[in-house]
């Protein structure tokens, strides 16, 4: 199993969540986060002055999937989350050693 963490634009969450559900990936967790990447934020103008916003609002999406489904999930997130502009996000993939469902103590893929 793998844990997929994706940092995406907040306005893309609904579309990505719907596409993942239609592909059979129902369980996920989201967080409202702030961060910056290579662009180091953006410069905004207010009246006559400019100021830098260096931490931009993003959404963090987490889900655990079977190894065979990782590429499918990456494809869905990239296809829908991509705008072609800086700040579209990143995807991180990590191994998961074990999953345990708290309610039943079930382990492994069945617990996801």
Image (spheres, rainbow, N blue to C red):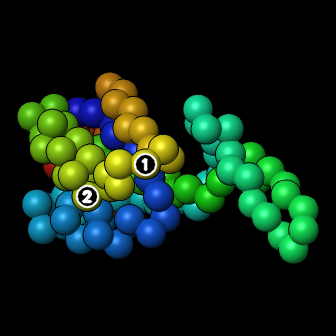
Q: Give the labeled residue for mark 1.
A: 85
Assess disc 1: are there few (<14), some (14-19) or many (≥20) residues with their C-alpha within 10 Å of its C-alpha.
few
For the residue labelled by badge 2, is the local secondary structure a helix, a strand or a loop? helix
Residue 39, quarter of the rendered image: top right
Pick out the residue farthest to the front.
48
Residue pictured at 12% horizontal, 68% vertical: 22
Residue 102: x and y in percent read 39, 54
Q: Can residue 105 be spotted in the picture? A: no
Residue pictured at 39% horizontal, 66% vertical: 13
In this picture, is 51 found above or below 67?
below
Residue pictured at 19% horizontal, 65% vertical: 19
Q: Give the labeled residue for mark 2.
A: 80
Separation of marks 1 and 2 at Cα, in angstroms: 13 Å
Front residue (pair 47, 18): 47
Quadrant (top left, top right, bottom left, bottom right) of the N terminus: top left
Residue pictured at 29% horizontal, 70% vertical: 15
Residue 63: x and y in percent read 33, 49
Front residue (pair 47, 100): 47
Residue 5: x and y in percent read 41, 42
């Amino acid at each position: 199993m793998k844990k997929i963490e994706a940092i995406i634009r907040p306005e893309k969450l609904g579309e990505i969540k719907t596409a993942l559900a239609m592909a059979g990936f129902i369980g996920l967790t989201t967080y409202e986060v702030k961060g910056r990447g290579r662009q180091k934020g953006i410069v905004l103008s207010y009246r006559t002055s400019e100021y830098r916003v260096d931490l931009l609002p993003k959404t963090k999406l987490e889900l655990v999937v079977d190894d065979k489904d990782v590429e499918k999930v990456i494809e869905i997130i990239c296809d829908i989350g991509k705008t072609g502009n800086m700040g579209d996000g990143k995807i991180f993939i990590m191994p998961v050693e074990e999953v345990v469902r708290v309610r039943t103590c079930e382990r492994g893929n069945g617990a996801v």
